[in-house]
Amino acid sequence: MTEPTAEDRALRSRVLLLLLFAYIFNFIDRNIAGVLAVPIREEFNLSDTALSHLGVAFGIFYAVIAIPIAWAADRKSRVNIIAASVALWSLFTAACGVVQSYTQLVVARMGVAVGEAGGIAPSYSLISDYFPRERRSRALAFYSLGIPIGSALGVFFGGWLAAQLSWRSAFIIVGLLGLPAALLIKLLVPEPERGRFDAAPAVPMPAAEVLRTLVRIPSFWLLSFGAASGSILGYGLIFWLPSFFNRSFGLAVDQVGLFYGSIVLVGGALGTWLGGVLGDRIGPSRPGGYALIPAVCFLVTAPMLALGLFAPNLPLAWVLFTIGQMLALAWLGPVITAIQHIVVPAMRATASASFLFINNLIGIAFGIYFFGWFSDAMKAAHGVDSLKYSILYGLGFYLLAAVFYLFAARRLRDDLKS
């Protein structure tokens, strides 16, 4: 492998930082609804089930729209698609602050989902053409730091702005702050040659051929359903844990923002980076490691979070939830890298969108709805603790995710492309 020049390294760093900047706003705008759910629920007098419709609408629209956008990204300028998507989701986030009914809020969140659907899969493909195979897991893990950083900032600033101003102001402010990211990507990120670090030619393929190819790759489906099972908790918890801390520990909305935001930031950032480092260290020589890393982490995550739910005080709860958050996000770098490696370069954006379709349709739409519905269903048995027990029983999805990843680890060596 030829060592990159100083100019190449500077360009890679700039591109990765700008894409991370946009991804942070992606998750600020996506997850701010979780901490704002407390005042939204009160203003519109909603049940937990009704409140979960925000996640259902977002998840369905995100999953469905992502595939045609990614198909276009395998053929057209990924930079233009990403920049336009950032602008769109930022404007719709701001629009959430001016709605006059809960129905209008749900529709505005659908608009956020349409914008965000065009940001991630094209970015995965773009990063894979800026970084060679042996450095991709760390690069994709660095990009994925947008998840814990954005989620933490969404929880923190959402809670603080809602307490200082209103939940409507929180949506408007964070939405408008994301617009500069769209302009910076458009002006400062060059479109790289597709497949520049790969042996296979980057020739566009018909969508039907891409889907036929994916159907024949067992590890793609095992990785996708493993990620989806874990994301039922990932998206479900980021939406519902603020309400849990409010109900079970008596924290006000701004206190929830600081307490839970620090958990997501510290635990999530450590876990995301650690997973990327382990992926680059283990995956190239032992491809099954890309799946074995999250399998082991999820097996430990479930009991950690279960202990956190019943912690007798906030300091102990913080430690347990932070460890659980760290382990829960270690999958990102290894699994996303494996998805890039099991298809040829011309299929990467579409394969990533198909992976995200499964992950988000199940994770966002079902995950957020499941915990809200289950909480309402158990109110007769557990009263004010119904949300706590809804989360406790839902931790079984982490164990299911580990099973999928263990099977994927056995298949990856045969499925990875050279």
Image (tube, rainbow, N blue to C red):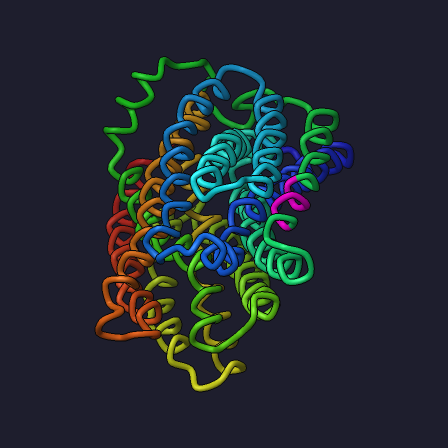
Quadrant of the image for the C terminus? top left
Q: Examine the rendered structure and indicate whether residue 42 appears above or below residue 73.
A: below
Residue 367 coordinates in the image, percent (x, y): 33, 51
Quadrant of the image for the N terminus? top right
Q: Residue at x 54, y 21 (%)?
A: 194
Residue positioned most to the bottom: 312
Does residue 373 appear in this view?
yes
Most foreground residue, 100 or 290? 100
Residue positioned most to the right: 6
248 on left or right of 257 = left
Report the number of numbered marks. Answer: 0
Most foreground residue, 326 or 96? 96
Residue 172 coordinates in the image, percent (x, y): 65, 43
Does residue 135 appear in this view?
no
301 on left or right of 122 = left
Most foreground residue, 195 or 260? 260
Most foreground residue, 26 or 347? 26
| Residue 375 quadrant | bottom left
Q: Give yes or no for residue 396 being in the magenta stretch.
A: no
Q: Residue at x 32, y 58 (%)?
A: 371
Q: Examine the rendered structure and indicate whether residue 312 appears above or below residue 276.
A: below
Q: Residue at x 33, y 21 (%)?
A: 210
Residue 102 coordinates in the image, percent (x, y): 45, 44
Residue 177 coordinates in the image, percent (x, y): 70, 42
Q: Examine the rendered structure and indicate whether residue 61 appears above or below residue 51.
A: above
Q: Residue at x 41, y 31 (%)?
A: 353
106 on left or right of 404 = right
The boundaries of the magenta stretch are: 170-175
Give the main secondary structure of the magenta stretch: helix
